[in-house]
Image (tube, helix red, strand yellow):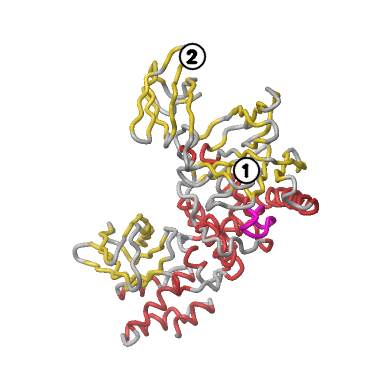
Amino acid sequence: MISSRRPGLTQVVFNTSDLDIRGISFGDDEADYRISGDSLLIHLPDTLGRSEELTFRINWESSSPYGIHTDVYGNSWTSLNPQMQNHWLPIPDHPELESLVKATFIIPADKEVVFNGEKTGEEVLSAEQRKVNWATAGKVGVTGLTVAVGNFVQESARTGVNEVSLWTSENGLLDEVRNGVLQVAVESIKQYESELEFEFPYKTLQIIVLPDHRWEEVQAGAGVIYLYQNLGSLGAQLRRGITAQWFGNYHRYIRPIDNRYEFLKALVVGSQSEQLGEGANLESMKQWNRSEKAVEFMKNEFQKNVIKTSLPELVQRFEGVTNWEEYADIWYDETGAFWYGVASDMKLGGENESGSSVYKVEYLYDEMGGNLTLVFEAETEAVHSLVGVDAVEYGFTDTTRSELTFTGERDSVEVGISSGIEYSTLHVTSDQNITLQEEKPFMFLIRQLRNSDPEVQIQAAKQLSSYSENPDVQLAIQDVLSNEENAEVRAALLE
């Protein structure tokens, strides 16, 4: 069943990579459809108005080598990595889409199937096969749908109104380990519900333990968590996966593998967090490990505390597809500063910068013409994929931001600015490990020193060292020092 979000809907488009579409019907009538590349275009029999619903049936088969894993132990499960669902399920593969889901599986009689939601019934079809029904209690994001089939045994526990089920191979875990995992789940859900002042987003939680991660970057779906025995502590993986039910599934992100969202999860887990996936070469694990260190070592305690205390408000205010900018607007209302710099602060948490790509950024500012060009030039090995950057312009009366991209050995980007610009800041938002060495105009840095955010002040103070012979710099520094109480800002100014 689909529901239209706009008036005048005449066709729908589903993503269907590697799927063999056998037929589509509206009731007893066959539907008119066509396949173009990886898209399935279905022509509706009647124009659909806003909020009107229509039910149809798709018959398909998938034998795709992508999106479905099978291991040597006979376990099969579907990938949660971005753009993988459409290799086994015909859906619009986008986090905006959510739906109630009912699913029927026919499986070998000696196996179990695990899906989102809860098992609603089963029927023995023969000595070799069973039919099993699952359904979600409410709408879930389709990008969080996943199914696993294997020789699983189930153990369950309850936390309030929520049922938690642990699915493992019969001899996959010691009894005391199984009991410990269930206990971590129950205690963590209670703790995080209290801290976030918000109930667990789903009626049930399915926890599936498997031996090998198979390069899965996303380990948590809607009410489902995969624990991989070769990624480290099961308890630490589980705590991270439970926080991802709020920050990753209840709140869904266009780009789910992002160190800023890992930082939010690490804030919730707090002192119980651990490093994960050492040597696994998974980007999500690298970002978790950086974030886990950042929570412990982050120098800007004020920023960390404001973000942590805001988490209940974030969860309560937003639902569905959300982004960092919406979060940052809340912090701006409280502090007067745009905080896109958490990723930079995380590098202060003891991380070795030697693996980063360094770019020099030259500001070409035409004050008369009101134009600003940023020239990005690689100082180390260049990055040949697009690097996303948030540019924040601080003006006399307001603050604006824009999204930029650059790539390669050398790239230049025109930035739209107002005539009243005082200074600007740049923050890398992409997943790449990038360090920007900015060369700002002298007056930008002088004005930046008067920002209320200590990290922004420290950044300006360090960059002003290249103007150390300028007497105006010394006067500006003395002026700031006479009123500055933050010890770290004072130290940076005196270096």
Choose top left, top right, bottom left or bottom right for residue 408: bottom left
Which residues are the magenta region?
228-238
Crowding at dot 2, Cα within 10 Å, few <14 / some 14-19 / many 20+, comes out as few
Choose top left, top right, bottom left or bottom right for residue 102: top right
Q: CA distance from mark 1 to mark 2?
A: 36 Å
Task: State yes or no: residue 449 in magenta.
Answer: no
- Whether tag 1 and tag 2 are in contact, CB under 8 A, the answer is no
Q: Which mark is residue 75?
A: 1
Mark 2: which amino acid? Gly
Q: Nearer the viewer, residue 89 or 365?
A: 89
The image quadrant where one finds the C terminus is bottom left
Q: Nearer the viewer, residue 143 or 8?
A: 143
Q: What x and y, as percent, mark residue 164?
A: 72, 42
Crowding at dot 1, Cα within 10 Å, few <14 / some 14-19 / many 20+, comes out as some
Badge nearest the viewer, 1 or 2? 1
Judge left or right: residue 244 versus residue 61.
right
Could you tell me if residue 389 is visible in this image? yes
Q: What x and y, as percent, mark residue 168?
A: 70, 45
Q: Which residue is mark 2?
A: 27
Q: What x and y, as percent, mark residue 292?
A: 59, 63
Q: Nearer the viewer, residue 443 or 427?
A: 427
Q: What x and y, as percent, mark residue 255?
A: 46, 50
Q: Secondary structure at mark 2?
A: loop
